[in-house]
Image: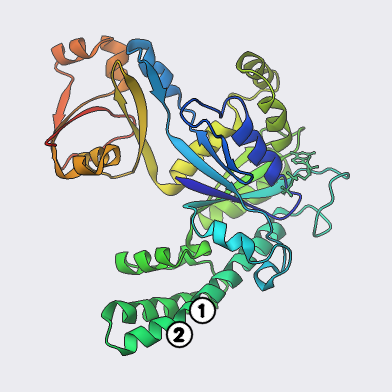
Amino acid sequence: MEAGIVGLPNVGKSTLFNALTCSKAAQSANYPFCTIEPNEGIVSVPDSRLERITKFIPPQKVIPAALKLVDIAGIVKGASEGQGLGNKFLSHIREVDAILQVVRCFEDPDVVHVAGDVNPLVDIETIEMELMLADMQTLDNSLPKAERAARTGDKEAKLRVDVIKKCTAHLATDQPLRKLEADENETKIIRSFGLMTAKPVLYVANVDENDLLGEGPLVKQLQDFATKVGAEVVPVCAKLEAELAELDPADRAEMLESVGLKEPALALLARATYRTLGQQSYFTAGEKEVRAWTIPVGATAPQAAGVIHTDFEKGFIRAEIYTLADLEQYKTEKDIRAAGKLRVEGKTYIMQDGDICHFLVNS
Ligand code: GDP
């Protein structure tokens, strides 16, 4: 999964990106290069269920799920017309699955706001407008080629032309494409264009150090807006996260507790990103490794097996599944089986969040 961090300048994007990707907690032996490029990093998704499983099944290795974060700088008013870093940011953002928009909700006279004052809704509108204009350009640029191909009788190209026109008409009403109703084929085409306002968005409220839980009026404003458009808001204090990132685990836990927070921002953001993208986790657990895998909500058992290895989807025979609650009650797989709680599931089984699985496959 890949998420792009966007926002106006000076809202705290880089502070947050650096805190998330370079903290000692984010670094893991599995992803040794926490920062691949100055603006790209892979982080381990914190999941307390992994620790709970390893209490009963101590493995040689624990492999959490991974989330790729991309810090996309350069969106300012006029970016789509080449202001600021201009179109450079577009190539990065096209590839991400979700957009994390950092919205400034902190007041600080020392940090200049590009539009003069702190106003979350105006900031959101500015970014959304730039992304809509950029999408409009992408569609305009794609139309002539699709039309030429459609004239040769290419049916798929004809559908592309229709989708381009449908999207253009929708954007002309000042609505982002994530609100456009589209069937499966249309959605596939929209995805292939990398249209940015079609991507799900999550608002990250960069809150004041004095309002860590995000109870102030600016966050409330943002929350009301997000509820209206069906998005989530995650309050985060980038400045505090930057301080936390410098600490080792024991000191970090102590500091979190002293300011009244239960978890670092990465855990909150990762969970919200999963929800926004309609993803969930399942686990495989053995002596060698305990590992988290990411699948869409609604995935079947063969599809889940296919995430481990593409051949496993076709070769799927059956799955043996139990839950973390079973493991905590019966302590070992042997006793789970003896208690009749090890379920045998077939090809049509719909995976549930947190399932612990063994797959039997023909390979
Ligand atoms: P970007 O341009 O969006 O990447 O913003 P930066 O991360 O460079 O932050 C801009 C300035 O705001 C820096 O001086 C940060 O130290 C400051 N800043 C970022 N987050 C916070 C915050 O939560 N509270 C306060 N007071 N300042 C912050």
Image quadrant occupied by the N terminus? top left
Disc 2 Cβ-to-ligand 1 distance below 8 Å: no
Real-space CA distance between mark 2 and mark 1, rounded to the nearest whole angstrom:
7 Å
Q: Secondary structure at mark 1?
A: helix
* Residue 127, visible in the rendered structure: yes
Q: Which mark is residue 93?
A: none
CB contact under 8 Å: marks 2 and 1:
yes
Q: Which mark is residue 144?
A: 2
Query: Which quadrant of the figure has residue 344?
Result: top left
Disc 1 Cβ-to-ligand 1 distance below 8 Å: no
Residue at image point 32% right, 67% down: 183
In the rendered view, would you say 316 is above or below 91? above
Residue 342's x, y, as percent?
A: 17, 21
In the rendered view, would you say 261 is above or below 121? above
Residue at image point 55% right, 38% down: 269
* Horizontal side, residue 98 vs residue 106: left or right: left
Residue at image point 49% right, 25% down: 29
* Residue 173, visible in the rendered structure: no
Residue 103's x, y, as percent?
A: 68, 49
Q: Secondary structure at mark 2?
A: helix
Q: Amino acid at mark 1?
A: Asn
* Horizontal side, residue 193 vs residue 341: left or right: right
In the rendered view, would you say 141 is above or below 285? below
* Horizontal side, residue 102 vs residue 152: left or right: right
Residue 158's x, y, as percent?
A: 32, 82
Q: Quick one: which residue is furthest to the right in this view? A: 109
The residue indicated by pointer 1 is 141
Circle 1 residues within 10 Å: few <14, some 14–19, many ≥20 = few
Ligand 1 located in image quadrant: top right
Q: Amino acid at mark 2?
A: Pro
Viewer-proximal residue, 53 or 85?
A: 85
